[in-house]
Amino acid sequence: MTLPESLSSRAVTDPDVKATYGIDESVGALAPDRYEVVRARDLGDVVDVLAHAQATGTPVVPQGARSGLAGGSVALDGGIVLSLEGLTTITELDAVEGIAVVQPGVINADLKAAAAAEGLFYPPDPASSAFCSIGGNVATNAGGLCCVKYGVTADYVRGLEVVLAGGEVIRTGHRTAKGVAGLDLTGLFVGSEGTLGVVTEVVTKLVPAPDPALTALATFDSLSAASDAIVALRRERHRPSLLELLDEPTLAAVQAIADYGFPTGCAAVLIVQADRPGHTAEDVQRYAALLEEAGATEVAVADDAQESEALLAGRRALHHALVAKGTHFIEDVCVPVRQLTDLITAGHEISARTGVEITMSGHGGDGNLHPSFFYDAGDDDSRHRAEEAFGELVKVALGMGGTITGEHGVGSLKARWLPDEVGAASIERQRAVKALFDPRGILNPGRVYWS
């Protein structure tokens, strides 16, 4: 595999640096022996890569911050990794229209900060906000902690600039508040995980900034009471901006690294936030009353931002707690909200039966859990048992009318289950759509549509 002269100056040649582009954060990710890495500097570089790839039949893996967990941006043998991490310009921020125009390498938190400086808010809030890119968020239709009130990435993408296989550049969507001209190609590309084209510009919707959030934290001695509380909060006219759930094994892991005040034997903790302008104190007190009515054994309510941060400290420590607990992979399934705690119970039962340690925490307000499966890093059989345990949980989630992924994407690790969710007929039609945009199958082949 030889890159043309026009791309050689963009290629990564240092083997140690190149190796960092070979994998993402997915479990078991291994870089192949032969691949090239091209770091795009502008639209022209992307066009050149895709024109070359189309002409030579070379697979291309679009790549952002490499923080994905589903194996969607691991290098392919004989392919080109097309890195977009250098495209980091916020080219426009219009407070009147409520939009920002950004390149795909812009970090989520940086867009939030730029919007905040204008009194605006970009709501999609993945836990990886500090290092994940907008392009990656678009590729997987990422959500995060605030989906219960604000929705997911797709709700904030008005338009895209996309380079297709072969190098053709198209624009989708619109910059205006309204627009119904033609089919919704923007919606088609959001969540397509680099299988249809490479996004080089995003027109995002911004909303007025909320007030600084206030937090309530409630402990429960039963999952059923926690479920009742989630349902009551979902019925609220003014929904919480955040509603997180931590189960008993998760709480034990967090308490193992520091004392965050979680009682021993607590079945679940719910963390709730209010951010409605002019009404945060009123709303968080109402949420606290609902939590108590649902059966919370204890409810703590913050009076100011400092107390809010203190109540969130245990949730913010979650990643470090899971790392300290041991080698694991974190997954992503979503079920109807009423069945969330039934899924947690199923996870606990699978853990007890298989011997695989499983924590079941996540975004309680939208039914999106991120179960973590622990295994011995030096034992392949241990990892396979953990993967099989996750497969069992997937079947349970689908049986509840849920989905195999709420926000991480299908990638390569979940592609085997996609037909179980959408059906063979839908898969064939989706493959046909991919073939329309990518006739030679060079864009992220083997991802999403398992072969």
Image: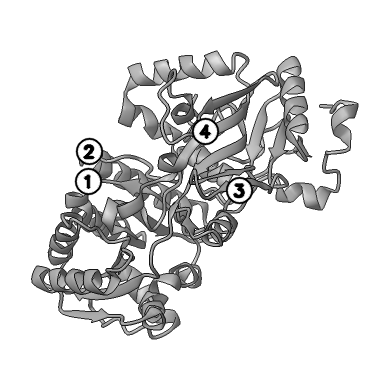
Image position of 349 with respect to 23: above or below: below
Front residue of 197/155: it is: 155
Q: CA distance from mark 3 to mark 4?
A: 27 Å
Where residue 160 sits in the image (x, y, percent)?
56, 32
Q: Are marks 1 and 4 in contact (CB under 8 Å)?
A: no
Could you give the CA–CA distance between mark 2 and mark 1, rounded to whole angstroms?
Answer: 7 Å
Instruction: Please tell me how crowded label 1 is: few (under 14), some (14-19), or many (20+) other residues with Cα within 10 Å.
Output: some
- Please tell me whether residue 411 is drawn above or below residue 284 in the rendered image: above
Q: Is residue 62 above or below residue 137?
A: above
Q: Earlier in the sequence, mark 2 or mark 1?
A: 1
Alpha-carbon span between mark 4 and mark 2: 31 Å
In the drawing, does residue 214 fall left or right of residue 201? left
Q: Amino acid at mark 1?
A: Pro
Mark 2 against mark 1, which lies toward the viewer? Answer: 1
Q: Residue at x 43, y 24 (%)?
A: 184
- At numbered mark 3, what does the secondary structure look like: helix, strand or loop? loop
The residue lying at 22 percent from left, 38 percent from top is 401
- Residue 336: which disc? 1
Label 2 sits on residue: 401
Residue 410 lies, in percent from the top left, at 45, 37
Q: Residue 131 location in percent, x, y?
A: 59, 58
Q: Residues within 10 Å of mark 3 (few under 14, many from 20)?
A: many
Tags 1 and 3 touching, CB below 8 Å: no
Q: Could you say which is closer to the camera, residue 447 or residue 176?
A: 176
Q: Disc 3 or disc 4, which is closer to the eye? A: 4
Secondary structure beneath disc 1? Answer: loop
> Closest to the observer: 8 or 248?
8
